[in-house]
Amino acid sequence: MSWYGFFKVPFTQFVKHGYKATITGAENIPATGPVILASNHVSYADTFLTPALIKRQVTLPVKAEAFRRDQGFTWSVIAWFLRAVGMVPLDRSGGRAALDGLGPVIEALEQGRVVGIYPEGTRSPDGRLYQGKTGVARLALSTGAPVVPVGILDADIAGTKFGIPWVERPRIIVGEPLDFSVWKGMQDDRAMGRWVTDEVMAAIQKLTGQTYVQAYAASVKSGSMDAAEADRRVRERPGGGPPPKEPTGGLS
């Protein structure tokens, strides 16, 4: 048994019977091959609820700093653990570096693994759904992997029990896969990247029913955008309209 399996077996039982977590639509996740799980992000609990409740191993991108082994014994142990359970480093510095930093995630997909990603880039500051960053589109358009939308509900931390952060009856809803493979290779096209990202976010919104804000969550959390401006950016749904380019080879 791998280290991932060693930790997952008892943890899955804890999530199911302790938190009383439920999942619907798990059959929408392909049984084999690369898959991108794209989810809303409302709680710290999101990062372990979905991996615990689906059969396939989920690889999550973790900030690259956590993989450094030159920060003392504790961080060396953390770096070992993350690699042992299949996590991969992600550069979160932004811009070109962040895009180039998707290399380990793309490699995981090319190996046929399931990768989980939160397109919003950070937890929602108020429970609403915020604009997705285009990394999810870059992954899909680079690899041709299907994107499976995931909605997480009722996952707010409700205090602690026995010193453990506690969640009461969280729900995971898995939607049908989105196939963007006809546009594979167009990961550097900005318009296509935005359209794909908005389609993914719209699919997540359909599962969760969240209000959509056309702004980045990080802007609100950092204070560079105030609550009033965020309210003015509420939209019915992300994006909309046809794709900006025809599929490779033209329409059939």
Image (tube, grey):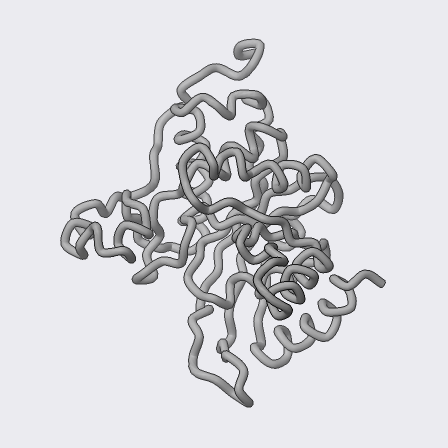
Q: In which quarter of the image is residue 209?
A: bottom left
Q: Residue at x 41, y 48 (%)?
A: 120
Q: Which residue of the protein is positioned furthest toward the right in this rendering? A: 1
Q: Residue at x 32, y 56 (%)?
A: 128
Percent from the top left, x then y, of residue 205?
40, 49
Position above or below: 24 against 206: below
Q: Where is residue 149 in the image (x, y as percent from the top left)?
A: 52, 47
Horizontal side of 125 relative to 151 (left or right) equals left
Label total for image:
0
**Is 138 in front, or is 234?**
138
* Residue farthest to the left, as pictured: 228
Image location (x, y in percent) of residue 235: 25, 44
- Quadrant housing residue 154: bottom left
Please report the residue visible at 40 percent of the width from the left and 43 percent of the height from the top: 132
Q: Which of 142 and 24 is in front in this view?
A: 142
Q: Quadrant of the N terminus?
A: bottom right
Instruction: Give the vertical position of 177 relative to 18 (above or below).
Output: above
